[in-house]
Amino acid sequence: MIVFAIETSCDETSISIVQDEKIDKRILSLVTRTQVNEHQAYGGVVPELAARAHLSNIEPVINQAIRQAEIELDAIDAIAVTAGPGLIGGVLVGITLAKALHISLNKPLYCINHLEGHALTARLSHDVPYPYLLLLTSGGHCMFVEVLGFRQYTLLGQTLDDAAGECFDKIAKLLDFDFPGGPALEKKAALGNPKRFAFPRPLEHTPLPNFSFSGLKTAVKQTIEKSILNQQTVCDIAASFQYSVGEIFKERLQKALKCSHHKVERLVMAGGVAANQYLRSQLQSVCADNAIEAIFPPMNLCIDNAAMIGWTAIEAIQNSVLPSTDEFQPKPRWPLEQIQL
Ligand code: KG4
Ligand code: ZN
């Protein structure tokens, strides 16, 4: 079974052709074009610009993905597309393309939840068996989810305000780092002293594995405003902030382990923030202490990508989920735990 997949829900235009084969043969092609240049000047994703960039990037990305996969379009068995949650302009570009292909090629359409794509990425990359604990942390989300089976998702905790990636991006902007902020901040943090500034860890004294990053963001902002920002101080602020996020992740993981309904043997970290090597190592240390296997998908599958969307459609088909109709409307908001078999 070969699936043509489309992801356009934020600032990555991505097309992938995936099949239900052994791990090393699954991804026939994956082409992801980021929009760094379009959003650089604004220090964040501008939704209208993102939608326009998807429109102009999508055709060359499709052509490259088809060339890379070395298949003809009529060899495709199904079309998968991110139908939400995300920036509505971008989602509309993807879903319009998907419906056009569905009608013209007469192939079934699968409208996929972007968060479910992130949640199942480790099954695509590592064949991780169910059940597992998932820390999904991206620019828009930060949550612990028990993935008990396909479309059996239990939310254990989530952010009450900002997402971790959003916090990285905003602090990076205040420190004048290049966009996107997360990777730039991680690089500077590696050169700084993580113990120079003691930043807060909101919700430390509550039993649930929820997150809150807005207080941390404000504390860092205030430190930036009252500091003389030489190179070392900038790196020390980045390092101290990243250290706090690491401590928060470790402590919330302990809480998630206590709250979970199954004996956790595997932790999967997914979403753009999972690209952060320091945060990975912190989570890995908690896992090692608890005899839990920590699984991190490769970088190109941690950031937004169409391969995870295609893979989710493959699991949907394997679980006899009926295809979506042409009436399917994009959903700017679409909580993961609402999807059920
Ligand atoms: O999953 P993703 O590509 O898009 C969303 O669905 O949001 O995640 C993007 C987020 C951004 O906030 C970006 O700054 C963050 O992931 N990110 C990182 C790193 N690489 C990407 N955050 C911290 N450290 C990184 N190395
Ligand atoms: Zn994402």
Image (spheres, rainbow, N blue to C red):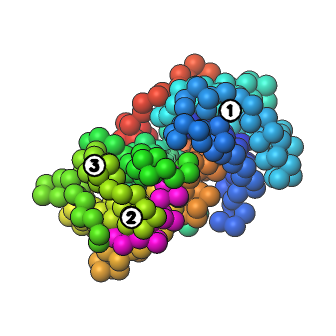
Name the spot of residue 324 as percent of width and height, x first.
Answer: 58, 29
Among the two numbered marks 1 and 2 on one chain, the one whose residue lies closer to the N terminus? 1
Q: CA distance from mark 3 to mark 1?
A: 35 Å
Mark 1, residues whose alpha carbon is within 10 Å: few (<14), some, or many (≥20)?
many
Image position of 319 (left or right of 285):
right
Q: Which mark is residue 222?
A: 3
Quarter of the view holding residue 38: top right
Foreground mark, 1 or 2, reads 2
| In the foreground, 73 or 255 | 255
Instruction: Report the magenta residues as a range.
Output: 181-194
Amino acid marked by disc 1: Ala
Do the CB atoms of the residues marked 2 and 3 lie less than 8 Å apart? no
Q: Which mark is residue 53?
A: 1
Magenta span includes 289: no
Would the CB of label 3 be found within 8 Å of ligand 1? Answer: no
67 vs 330: above or below: below
Amino acid marked by disc 3: Gln
Q: Which mark is residue 233?
A: 2
Magenta span includes 188: yes
